[in-house]
Amino acid sequence: MLTKRHDFIQYFINKNAGKNYLEIGVDQGNVFFSIQVKNKIAVDPEFKFDNFKKLTRYIAKPNRPALLSNLNAKYFEITSDSFFENHKPTEKFDVCFIDGMHEFDYSTRDAVNCLNHLTDNGVIILHDCNPLNKEEEISFDDWKKRGFTGGWKGDVWKTIVYLKAFRKDLNVCVVDTDQGLGIVTKRNPNTPEKPYPFNFKDEAEIRNLDYAFFEQNRVALLDLVDVATYNKNL
Ligand SMILES: C[S@@+](CC[C@H](N)C(=O)[O-])C[C@H]1O[C@@H](n2cnc3c(N)ncnc32)[C@H](O)[C@@H]1O
């Protein structure tokens, strides 16, 4: 059963015999170093590891595929905006994991940029889509004022709402596990659109939604799926 973000990422890479993986927001590399794939790219303005730690991570994963995949990895110590603007990736990604700046404008730009570089059967996974209380949903500045304490998921959930409301070319849901994993794929035009029970007029309306509204409508807004049910339907 898939429960953690690592499991989902590796599952979709294996399912599609994927070769290219992009992770936005890598931090200590706990997920990044564990993923086995031919080519992987890490993007973060401040990696929390140095070359020595990278090396120890390679050695800590002694099996050959993980070692090769870590040796082939490319690291961009810049923001995701700068990555897409200045490095214009030429390859298409099979799986993108978005876990960078947890604010609506950033995570939406990340999602749109990833979609523009995604294979037809590729998958985008967004972390932290399901805040459990108002304290987790605050802005980055407020989290900073709080001394970076406590869980912080920001308002990535609004990116899910935006994609569900305005990107009818996609399938979007959130699996209720590991802080809420948003799963985005390209919709086959021959399959029916899933109706969305909200009628937002524009992006600004979504940006201005508040936590109380989210709490009242969580399941429908996110298309929140129980993890056992999601696994059963894989
Ligand atoms: C929650 S951590 C990532 C955790 C990692 N993906 C994992 O699962 O182990 C968020 C990371 O996003 C990075 N970050 C912040 N702003 C960013 C941006 N604009 N672009 C890319 N990464 C960003 C931070 O430096 C931090 O390391």
Image: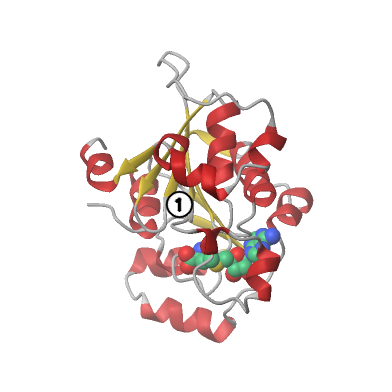
Q: Report the side of 215 relative to 8 (left or right).
A: right
What colouring does the structure picture have?
secondary structure
Element on which disc 1 rests: loop
Question: In the visual, does 62 lie left or right of 187?
Answer: left
Residue 194: image quadrant is top left
Q: Position of residue 128 (x, y in %)?
A: 48, 56
Tell me if residue 93 can be seen: no
Q: Which residue is mark 1?
A: 130
Image coords of residue 73 (percent x, y): 54, 64
In-front residue for pair 114/156: 156
Residue at left offset 53%, top offset 40%: 160
> Which quadrant would residue 183 be assigned to in this image?
top left
Residue 233 visible in this rendered orientation of the protein: yes
Q: Residues within 10 Å of mark 1 (few under 14, many from 20)?
A: many
Residue 31 vs 231, above or below: the answer is: below
Q: Give the residue drawn at x 52%, y 62%.
A: 136
Instruction: Report the number of numbered marks.
Output: 1
Is 216 on the left or on the right of 165, as rendered?
left
User: Residue 208: x and y, percent?
Assistant: 67, 42
- At horizontal 77% and vertical 49% (from top left) the residue drawn is 85
Toward the right, the furthest residue is 86
**Label 1 amino acid?**
Asn
Where in the image, quadrant-wise, is ligand 1 located? bottom right
**Disc 1 within 8 angstroms of ligand 1 (CB):** no
Expressed as whole percent of the image width and height from the top left, the position of residue 197 reads 47, 24
The quadrant of the rendering that contains the C terminus is top left
* Foreground residue among 105 and 48: 105
Q: Residue at x 48, y 16 (%)?
A: 189
